[in-house]
Image: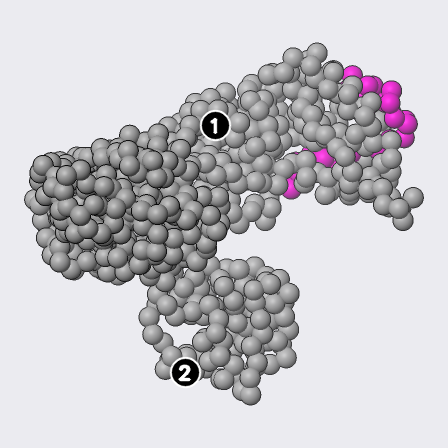
Amino acid sequence: MTVGLVAATAAGRRHARILADAWPHARLVESTGVADALRTAWTECGAVVAFLATGAVVRILAPLLGDKRTDPAVVVVDEAARHAVALLGGHAGGANTLAGEVAALLDARPVVTTATDAVGLPGLDALGWPVEGAVAAVSRAILDGEPVRLLADATWPLPALPPNVLIETIANDAATPTDAATSEIPATPVDPAVPSPPAGADGAAGSGVAGRHRAHGADPDGADPDGADPDGADPDGADPDGGTSDGGTSDGGTSDGGTSDGGTSDGGTSDGGTSDGGTSDGGTSDGGTSDGGTSDGGTSDGGTSDGGTSDGGTSDGGTSDGGTSDVGTSDGGWRLLVTDRIVPLDERTAVLRPPSLVAGIGSSRGVAAAEVSALLHRALADAGLAPASLRCLASVDLKADEEGILATARALGVPLETRPAAELAAVDVPHPSEVVRAVVGTPSVAEAAALAGGGTLLVPKTASAMATVAVARHAPRGRLAVVGLGPGAPDLRTPRAVAELRRAAVVVGLDQYVDQVRDLLRPGTRVLASGLGAEEERARAAVAEATVGQAVALVGSGDAGVYAMASPALEYADGRIDVVGVPGVTAGLAAAALLGAPIGHDHVYLSLSDLHTPWEVIERRVAAAAEADLVALLYNPRSRARDWQLGAVLKTFAAHRPPATPVGVVRNASRDGEQVHLATVATLDPAVVDMYSVVVVGSSQTRVVAGRMVTPRGYRWQR
């Protein structure tokens, strides 16, 4: 997204250049006058930062305002760059986020007036999912503290919501909601003759990972053979970064005693019913008419099927309903529904559309996008399912370049994900076809692609002349973010860490680490804090919460992957949840920065705690690092119970380096009581070291320059 920068004065242009230098996607927009420049930026850019008076920006842009979903974001910055005001497109356009980024670069104060942001609540239109209905009214009810019932088909990883949002009926089985939930989320009768309109028509169309295709991409392989059918288609945790161990507090932690965290539906009515000699689902129909719908095999056996279930038409005489219920109506109160089903809307109901549906698509080569789109929307409408809940379209690798499918994905704003035929062949489907297997290498494309990864079939394969569609519902995947909080100073905490804490509905961590970030949590966040020695319980609790669909943040000091909670948590996590790692500034990095540049060349991290590693193993590792002449950062260097190991380690290093080799000790890096001490490998007194300390032992090349430790990188000009 291009950010247009508009300024009227020399001061404004100076500020604009700061942004332009920091953002490759930003450009200074100039014209004959500032008004023309602003209008040009509005027309040509996805966002605008204007160094102008707010009133002037409002007057110039007022005639151009259209819709908040399509208008660019606008941020206004004053002449002195003291405030960055999110003026237009706060949620939908991203102006609130942009204002924060501008403020960070200009050392200004972001001004966000969106009501939900002002009080720390998530906006319903800022959750990343389509939202329909009385969004503003329900949001206002949430803000006003009125009771709002949240009714969901399944537990989805939503951020924390305030206590007045009452989660009453949650079914963990995404395919079969509880009776209570279904009764509260009634179906709306749908006219099958009127396809639902595409959702998110101007959204992004996927990512570039293997097997996932942007809707404008093309794979040169995969032409169909003649007659191919549509379906041919630390545990130690005891370190300055991870928690505590053995007797003192490491990186804000604590002492001696443990690791710390441093229906299937039976039908699906197809509109088409008969194959008139065109291409059917497995190849080319040889002229007969199938009595029950489009024949699944490609070549029909005798012209007329015997009235059984055909792959493309009416299956078992039934119609898939997507799990909808036709009972239950609003009781007149405020409601927030989380469902993929088409539901009636009123002035007190908003609907969030979770990404629960996968549409499997098969086609003959050259299928038109209009045919794919019409078939898909009819299948969804007949089943009472909302197109806005489509997570992706799915097919076989052979279809990765099929423009009709890609164009449909583009219009829906979803990616096309493809899988190898061999992978689809392993998926159990209700309507396999040996003819399709012979042509494509899998007995099913549409159903198998929809089901792959563990879905439940809602719409069995239905066909048109050149396309097949099947729809499956996939259960929610919980989300576990393993978040490093940094060494202690708030300004060394990363923006991504803050964002993950704001996104979480559940935060798990060592009590003192959680206390560091309580002010960042949204109202309603559930906190599971515990003390030293409960590392296993924290890891298990975080994974368990994510497994039932929650958005969870497991926090640790420093970087949560360095002698901290990431390792034990990921030992328990399986493929049912998404895991996100958020790196943090380690105590070692913070200490090195305070000492100078001691780790400018090869270096090693070593923990001297023998709580989980035998001392004999630690000794061997220390000896190897000393012999290799590596700079060593020593975590957990000394505690009340371990007061002799550091002296032994220093002797080992002294045997391989000059006596004047610099050694630095940093206590409470970036925290209150920070201390920096320089000595040598021969003179360091271990008594000045405790569990709040990081010890940095230089290599034979490390020296002290102007009071700072420096390990040369080895550039030629340094020799």
State which quadrant residue 154 falls in. top left
Q: Is residue 710 magenta?
A: no
Residue 436 in sight: yes
Instruction: Check disc 1 and give the amino acid type.
Output: Ala
The foreground one among 437 and 705 is 437
Instruction: Check disc 2 and give the amino acid type.
Output: Arg
Tell me which numbered mark, 2 or 1, is placed earlier along the sequence: 2
State which quadrant residue 201 falls in. bottom left
Is residue 662 toward the left or the right of residue 366 in the image?
right
Q: Residue at x 27, y 52 (%)?
A: 466
Q: Which residue is mark 2?
A: 59
- Residue 484: image location, x then y, percent: 54, 38
Is residue 201 toward the left or the right of residue 41 in the image?
left
- Residue 443: image location, x then y, percent: 30, 34
Q: Which residue is mark 1?
A: 569
Is residue 336 toward the left or the right of residue 36 in the image?
left
In this rendering, the answer to whether 181 lies above or below 349 is above
Secondary structure beneath disc 2?
Answer: helix
Secondary structure beneath disc 1?
Answer: helix
Residue bounds of the magenta highlight: 648-676
